[in-house]
Amino acid sequence: MPRETLQGTLDLLILKTLAPGSEHGYGITCCILNASQNQLRVEEGSLYPALRRMEADGLIKAEWRASENNRRARYDHVTRAGKKHLAETVERWRRNTAAVSSFLDFA
């Protein structure tokens, strides 16, 4: 996927990944890659600044705890504001993609 498209969807991908529960950065990356059937690869240089920005915006909150392999890891989870933002963003994406799909089928 082109970089500019991915940048516009990164918050959505992160929030959707975190919606079921908290996850650490590497787990977020793996989940996005697996769920997209290896089509969407989020690099650390994009993921971690986005996580910090989203935390500053109040969309996610982080806590430090032990990972599956007993290493200290930062786990992020969606806040109430993040859940609201996710629902609004998903609805907007669905409307927009339906409109574009209708246009492509028509034209």
Image (cartoon, helix red, strand yellow):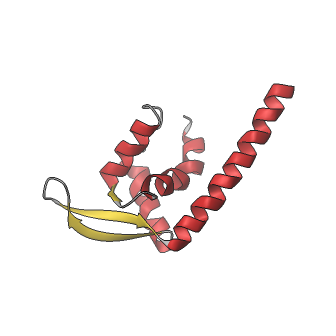
Relative to 92, residue 2 above or below: above
In this view, which residue lies farthest toward the right?
A: 107
Q: Quadrant of the C terminus?
A: top right
**Residue 50: image location, x then y, percent:** 46, 59
Which residue is nearer to you in this view: 42 or 4? 42
**Residue 57: image location, x then y, percent:** 52, 72
Q: Residue at x 54, y 34 (%)?
A: 1
**Residue 68: image location, x then y, percent:** 18, 54
| Lateral position of residue 69 relative to residue 16, left or right | left
| Lateral position of residue 40 relative to residue 98, left or right | left
Quarter holding residue 102:
top right
Which residue is nearer to you in this view: 23 or 55? 23
Say whether residue 57 is visible.
no
In this view, which residue lies farthest toward the left?
A: 70
In this view, which residue lies farthest toward the front?
A: 20
| Lateral position of residue 79 relative to residue 103, left or right | left
Q: Residue at x 63, y 53 (%)?
A: 90
Count the numbered circles shown. 0
Quarter holding residue 6:
top right
Relative to 49, residue 103 above or below: above
Relative to 45, residue 102 above or below: above
Say whether residue 22 is visible.
yes
**Residue 98: image location, x then y, percent:** 75, 40
